[in-house]
Image (cartoon, rainbow, N blue to C red):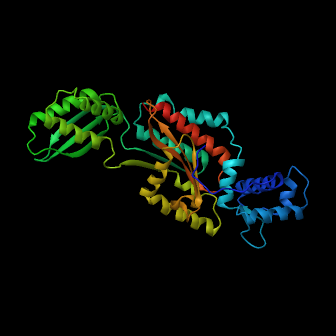
Amino acid sequence: MDHPSHQNLPELNERSVEIFKTIVESYLETGDPVGSRNISRHLPMTLSPASVRNVMSDLEEAGLIIQPHTSAGRMPTERGLRMFVDGLLQVGDLSSDERKILEKQISKDNSYKPVEDMLSEASGLLSGLSQCAGIVLTEKQITRLKQIEFVRLDETKALAVIVGEDNNVENRIIDIPKDLPPSALSEASNYLSSRLQSRTLREARAIIEDELKNQTAELDTLTTKLIQSGAAIWSGENDGKKSLIVRGRSKLIEDINAAEELERVRRLFDDLETKSELVELLSASEAASGVRIFIGSENKLFSLSGSSVIAAPFKDSERNIVGVMGIIGPTRLNYARIIPMVDYTAKLMSRLIR
């Protein structure tokens, strides 16, 4: 489990750990602050409410819990939640029913569908199982290629028409040398189509760059220039295009009564509209080796809405990371259940993408 860097957290003795865990687990289950009498009843050791209050006071001073109102009990702060998730959370396993639901939806039987459709379905599935919004961020084009053709638009521009094996078509405009003869366009099309067929853009680009670098391709200078400029654009690195899918926003407003909760969700919806920042946040998860968790204001995007993101990268058959999937919801999440759910879904998706 990977997570953003955070400040050093205090060392707690056994008594403090048990009381802290009880406060957090009660809050995650009910959403309500918990009082000292309730805590003392649930502890594995015998402690008076007065002793519990003393420990709670120390935990509050350490910034791990907070008293939202003077007469209320205590609930964890975002810092406390981070400490709990990092060091005290017992991550559960998915039930066999949950595994079957995921495996049925994300199976080889569905691999004939366009990748975008499979990812959208996976996002909706995560949303339904977690009762949060499901999110997927992926490269715009991750299918394998069938064919590429160049069509001249004017003296200095050409249209690259890229056809995938799933018959999706993507068009990109590229710059071409002014004196480029028509034969160079057809030569470049033939050269690329023969090397790109049944490969992803990433794989194809590596092969082409290797051939051009080692000068094993028998091409004239102008055709080589055309292919080099095209390869840079096809990789997606020049335009930064990412496809973002958000499913199940309505789940975030179910069972909400308190006005402040509605306001939090309204702010979260505003955050979800800030796509460039959400893409930036999820892109940070692509470097992670496993599930990555962002809690509340640890990420500037959710500093106002107090929301959590649980995300995991998924890969293609060459073990290249091609996207991230996960959920967005309130900081009060069933982390123990949702973390393995996101992890398992990402692993299933990795098996499907060729």
Quadrant, the N terminus? top right
Quadrant, the C terminus? top left
In the rendered view, does 196 fall on the left or right side of 75?
left
Q: Which picture quadrant has residue 289?
A: top right
Q: Is residue 33 in sight in this rendering?
A: no
Q: Is residue 245 in sight in this rendering?
A: yes
Front position in the image: 1 or 136: 1
Front position in the image: 320 or 9: 9
Total marks in image: 0
In the rendered view, does 146 fall on the left or right side of 219?
right
Q: Which picture quadrant has residue 2?
A: top right
- Percent from the top left, x then y, of residue 349? 50, 35
- Percent from the top left, x then y, of residue 3? 58, 49
- Percent from the top left, x then y, of residue 183? 10, 33
Residue at point 45% right, 57% down? Answer: 277
- Percent from the top left, x then y, of residue 352? 47, 31
Residue at point 19% right, 33% down? Answer: 189
Residue at point 48% right, 49% down? Answer: 284
Residue at point 70% right, 48% down? Answer: 87
- Where 103 falls versus 253 (above or below)? above
In the rendered view, does 211 fall on the left or right side of 102?
left
